Amino acid sequence: MTDSERQTGRRLERAILELLERRGPTATICPSDAARAVYDGDGDGWRALMEPARQAARRLVATGEVEITQAGRPVEPAGVRGPIRIRRAP
């Protein structure tokens, strides 16, 4: 991982936590919310940050700060496929 990728990852982690902080205690966000918050260009270039945003969410799960959910239920981040949501850990 390059320094730039690490820096982007940290920015995505902060964006996830900040977005959740602004919402209710049980609210969720989509990884795209964090990707859009971090992307500083025009158009849909934020889409390139989707997998890094999902990786940032996985790191935050590992620290116990958030949960990754599907259909409203927590899921194991390692094997999850498809759309996910992120919420604060209880």
Image (spheres, rainbow, N blue to C red):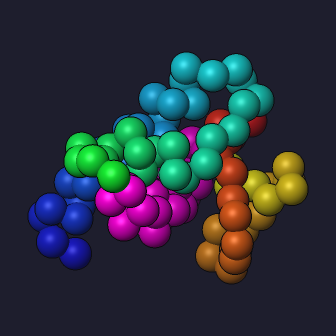
- 69 or 48, nearer to the observer: 48
Report the predominant secondary structure element of the magenta stretch: helix
**Residue 84, percent across and down?**
69, 59
**Residue 54, percent across and down?**
51, 62
Asked if residue 46 is among those painted magenta in the image, a careful observer would answer: yes
Q: Which residues make up the magenta segment?
A: 44-66
Q: Residue at x 79, y 59 (%)?
A: 70
Q: Does residue 14 sit above or below 70 in this rendering?
A: above
Does residue 10 appear anywhere in the picture? no
Q: Residue at x 86, y 56 (%)?
A: 71
Does residue 53 appear anywhere in the picture? yes
Exactly how many numbered labels are in the figure? 0
Quarter of the image where the C terminus is located: top right
Q: Does residue 35 sit above or below 15 in this rendering?
A: below
Asked if residue 32 is among those painted magenta in the image, a careful observer would answer: no
- Which corner quadrant of the image does residue 73 belong to? bottom right
Q: Is residue 28 left or right of residue 11?
A: right
Q: Which residue sits furthest left?
A: 3
**Residue 28, percent across and down?**
69, 38
- 48 or 60, nearer to the observer: 48
